[in-house]
Amino acid sequence: MSEFILRLMREEDIEQVANIEKEAYRDKWSDFAYRSELKDNNLAVYVVLAPKDDEKKVAGYGGFWVILDEGHITKVTIAKEYRGQKLGKELLWGMLKLAKMKGAERVTLEVRVSNKAAVGLYHKLGFTDSGIRPKYYTDNNEDAYIMWRELADVEVDSSER
Ligand SMILES: CC(C)(COP(=O)(O)OP(=O)(O)OC[C@H]1O[C@@H](n2cnc3c(N)ncnc32)[C@H](O)[C@@H]1OP(=O)(O)O)[C@@H](O)C(=O)NCCC(=O)NCCS
């Protein structure tokens, strides 16, 4: 039984999210970007992984857009002090279930070719590489792997629908 819950991101989470974002990404999103994703983007779903005994605490967060039957994952992040405890897996698996509930039949994402932890996580959860976007990341001209995962095997309990 997990000691964490997955819940929708709220505006009051953004300060913690922005702090985690700063230490996790060289091309970090601003607070404003998160605010506008939550407020103005009807296609977007953002979630937080929080300890059950402290639901206000953000241990990790992620997000995706659902466009027709495709989910486009924009973020999967675990705060440094919580890494290496399978929480990335728990977060991403919860996001796949939620994407399916929202109508996605497959999901896609881009990841830096040097990001061994994230590439390992995505492979572990069944994503496959489908190509490379050359120089996708403009801060250092790094290539991105493009990955996809079909959601046919992802079961959503009727109680979760
Ligand atoms: C990628 C990230 C979410 C992984 O979170 P995590 O909670 O540490 O990952 P987990 O403990 O759930 O590990 C799941 C799998 O990922 C892989 N993995 C995790 N950390 C790894 C590392 N440092 N090196 C190689 N593989 C790693 C392993 O396959 C692992 O499975 P295993 O433990 O059974 O071997 C986390 O490192 C992170 O937030 N990084 C910064 C943000 C980021 O780069 N996000 C991805 C953007 S595309």
Image (cartoon, rainbow, N blue to C red):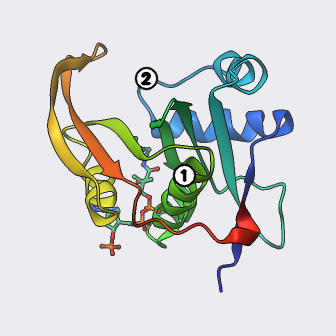
Q: In the rendered structure, which amino acid carries the disc numbered 1?
A: Lys
Residue 89: x and y in percent read: 46, 65
Residue located beneath label 1 in the image? 100
Q: Nearer the viewer, residue 70 or 35?
A: 70
Using residue 17 as the reference point, say whether residue 52 is left or right of it.
Answer: right
**10 Å crowding of disc 2: few (<14), some (14-19), many (20+):** few
Instruction: Compare marks 2 and 1 and give the one earlier in the sequence.
Output: 2
Residue 133: x and y in percent read: 18, 23
At numbered mark 1, what does the secondary structure look like: helix, strand or loop?
helix
Label number found at residue 143: none
Q: In the rendered structure, which amino acid carries the disc numbered 2?
A: Asp
Vertical placement of residue 148 versus 65, above or below: below
Using residue 120 as the reference point, say whether residue 91 is left or right of it.
Answer: right
Residue 46: x and y in percent read: 66, 40
Residue located beneath label 2 in the image? 27
C-alpha span from label 2 to label 1: 28 Å
For ligand 1, tell me if the residue under mark 2 lies within 8 Å. Answer: no
Give residue 41's quadrant in the image.
Answer: top right
